[in-house]
Image (spheres, rainbow, N blue to C red):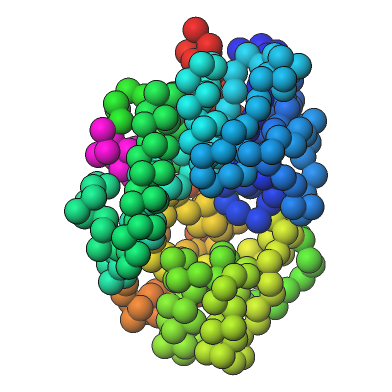
């Protein structure tokens, strides 16, 4: 496709999450050929966009809220609208009238609970249903509200052309009744990590992500201790479990949140990256970035991880002792970048999908 206009919609302008970073990578690639604009609910100040930005109240809402996009559409006149991390069902319902593509980044379209984890902390393999999901909630009124909201999102997005980052996510959507031909797997690509970032860092074992139970940060700490490896554990990220990590992780370094363009220095310092994801990863872009930099990854089998992972067999989900052994075995080795994640090839696939959607 030649020059055309794309309007991206996202809940925020940020680089604090994998979904935000992926969208910025797509925009950065598109501005070389196309006219691109971005509409967000708010900007958090962590990054500047490489294209014009419009703030539209309501785009960041997690519940149904009126959102007037008509004036912006009239001004930008996009050939295609690309929706990203927007979960306001009122916006998704409007999108059925546009030439629209939506990237489903996480589980909020088909799981009203904990990201495909049960209340007992086990992997959920059952599609959304009232009887199945009720056990994950203590408050019946709140459960009724969030289940209805999730179902409304699912109905709205099931009318759109959908992009997901992994075959795992496609299977989850199809299991809820979305027509398979509407769901297209276009994985992300690693970008913006080539610079040295903060400079020369000491060799380390690296965990990179939000400090929440779903990302397995406490499992990473436990596995590092069990490994007995003579390298410090560096935890790059922040979140509600920071205090708990500090209490359990004496001798570790907590960097706080690291801007994406400064992660390269930490990847270069890492001798292994740990990914003990407890939720089912929609993709797991940190692992792809590590392998792209030649850093081996010690990971559990979780969601879409197997689709980019290259190395010894993935560990069974929840196996902390196995994770400790993998840390020991992988230090001193190097990884190879996986094939199939070329920016240009993946963007060409997205362009082709835009053309079909416009038609």
Q: Is residue 127 above or below residue 276?
A: above
Where are the magenta residues, as a range?
167-177
In which quadrant is the N terminus drawn? top right
Residue in the picture at 54% in, 77% down: 241
Q: Picture coordinates of residue 120 (x, y %)? A: 28, 71
Say whether residue 193 is left or right of residue 100.
Answer: right
Q: Is residue 95 above or below residue 208?
A: above
Q: Residue furthest front?
A: 141
Q: Can you see residue 334?
A: no
Residue in the picture at 77% in, 40% down: 49
Say whether residue 325 is left or right of residue 20.
Answer: left
Residue 355 among magenta residues: no
Residue in the picture at 72% in, 45% down: 42
Q: Can you see residue 115?
A: yes
**Predominant SS of the magenta segment:** helix
Instruction: Name the quadrant containing residue 279.
Output: bottom left
Residue 169 among magenta residues: yes
Q: Is residue 347 above or below residue 23?
A: above
Say whether residue 80 is left or right of residue 138.
Answer: right
Say whether residue 345 is left or right of residue 238.
Answer: left
Image label count? 0
Q: Picture coordinates of residue 185 (x, y %)? A: 41, 33
Q: Picture coordinates of residue 168 (x, y %)? A: 33, 45
Q: Residue furthest left?
A: 131
Instruction: Name the quadrant containing residue 72.
Output: top right
Front-lying residue, 282 or 244: 244
Front-lying residue, 280 or 234: 280
Residue in the picture at 25% in, 39% down: 175
Q: Picture coordinates of residue 67 (x, y %)? A: 62, 32
């Amino acid at each position: 496709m030649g020059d055309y206009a794309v309007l991206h919609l996202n809940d925020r302008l940020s680089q604090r999450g994998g979904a935000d970073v992926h969208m910025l990578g797509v925009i950065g690639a598109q501005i070389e050929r196309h006219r691109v604009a971005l509409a967000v609910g708010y900007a958090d100040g962590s990054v500047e966009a490489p294209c014009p930005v419009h703030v539209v109240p309501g785009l960041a809402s997690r519940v149904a809220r009126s959102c007037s996009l008509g004036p912006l559409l009239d001004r930008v006149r996009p050939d295609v609208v690309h929706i990203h991390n927007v979960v306001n069902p009122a916006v998704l319902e409007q999108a059925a009238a546009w030439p629209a593509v939506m990237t489903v980044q996480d589980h909020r379209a088909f799981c009203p609970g904990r990201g495909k984890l049960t209340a007992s902390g086990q992997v959920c393999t059952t599609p959304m249903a009232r009887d199945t999901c009720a056990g994950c909630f203590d408050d019946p009124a709140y459960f009724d509200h969030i289940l209805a909201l999730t179902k409304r999102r699912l109905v709205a997005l099931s009318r759109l052309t959908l992009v997901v980052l992994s075959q795992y996510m496609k299977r989850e959507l199809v299991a809820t009744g979305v027509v398979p031909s509407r769901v297209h797997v276009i994985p992300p690509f690693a970008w913006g990590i080539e610079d040295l970032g903060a400079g020369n860092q000491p060799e380390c074992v690296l965990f990179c992500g939000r400090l929440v139970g779903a990302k397995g940060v406490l499992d990473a700490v436990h596995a590092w201790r069990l490994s007995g490896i003579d390298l410090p554990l560096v935890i790059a990220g922040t979140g509600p479990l920071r205090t708990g990590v500090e209490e359990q992780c004496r001798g570790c370094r907590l960097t706080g949140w690291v801007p994406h363009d400064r992660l390269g220095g930490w990847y270069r310092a890492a001798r292994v990256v740990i990914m003990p994801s407890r939720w089912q990863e929609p993709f797991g872009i940190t692992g792809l970035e590590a392998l792209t930099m030649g850093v081996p990854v010690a990971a559990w089998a979780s969601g879409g991880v197997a689709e980019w992972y290259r190395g010894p067999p993935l560990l069974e989900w929840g196996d902390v002792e196995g994770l400790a052994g993998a840390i020991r075995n992988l230090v001193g080795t190097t990884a190879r970048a996986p094939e199939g994640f070329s920016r240009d090839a993946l963007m060409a696939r997205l362009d082709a999908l835009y053309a079909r959607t416009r038609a």
